[in-house]
Image (tube, rainbow, N blue to C red):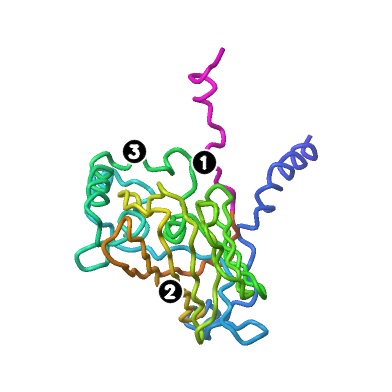
Amino acid sequence: MKTLIAIVVAALAAPLSAQWLNYPTPGVPKAANGQPNLSAPVPKTADGKPDFSGIWRVERGRVADGPPCLTRGCQELRTGDQWLDFGAGLSGGLPYQPWAADAKKQRMDQEGKDDPTSWCLPLGVPRLLVSPELMKIVQTPGLMVILNERNAGFRQVFTDGRPLPEDPQPTWNGYSTAKWEGDTLVVQTNGLRDGIWLDRYGSPITDSAKVTERFRRTNYGSLEIGVTVDDPKAYTKPWTAKVTERIVLNTELMDYICAENEKDMKTHMVGK
């Protein structure tokens, strides 16, 4: 009987270890006390460029003032300000066109209930950078891939010299190419679709937007991304915000599928 119980316990425990949630990250620089040295120099690729590979999470910051949801301690609001308002750190906020300012105010008043993510739709670019879920960067010659836990999403950034497409079919993450300027990888993206929200408060982005991101790893544990949005439909001028990511060690991505185990539709959306 004891042997049978041991077998059952082992079988139940196996999936947990298979998730690699506590598997040591290889190559982590160590301080004299044996702890990870997050201030260590930036790792390099074989061609001498900064290596952005790793698992990252947006830096946790103060919580901005906002709708009543904040007083209820919503989980997503414990991360950086930009999940709520991409212009939280900008003097005067984002330079909205009148219609965009009205749209944001209405969406804030409704506590973001029409946020596309509330309907399990993708976050889009650049909102993916400030999502509370983890993201993983895989850097290879000619291509940088950004994987996200949320809805098992992915994004491709081509570094092989190809130009941005002309008149592309709009997508949630757009089309991204990049080139190096010293130790900074400058990523340009077009082909985004109308209706994407930049943040939980509903700052809009349209299909006229061009997004430039400047990836710079300042040390082993920190990644700074300058985000410039040039979207004349929604904003009176281009604007730039900075996103800081911190490396996350000894873990791996796990699926977060928004509609997994959803049962309401089968109950209430019944056709003939």
Mark 3 belongs to which amino acid? Lys
Q: Dividing the image into 4 quarters, which one contains the C terminus?
A: top right
Q: Residue at x 75, y 42 (%)?
A: 6
Q: Secondary structure at mark 3?
A: loop
Label 2: how many Cα within 10 Å (few below 14, some 14–19, many 20+)? many
Residue closest to the eye, 212 or 26: 212
Which residue is outermost to the top?
A: 272
Q: Residue at x 71, y 48 (%)?
A: 14
Label 1: how many Cα within 10 Å (few below 14, some 14–19, many 20+)? some
Magenta highlight range: 254-272
Find disc 1 in the rendering and name its residue.
258
Q: Position of residue 243 (x, y in %)?
A: 39, 68
**Mark 2 vs 1: CB contact within 8 A:** no
Residue closest to the eye, 194 or 70: 194
Find disc 2 in the rendering and name its residue.
224
Q: Position of residue 247 (x, y in %)?
A: 50, 69
Disc nearer the start of the sequence (1/3): 3
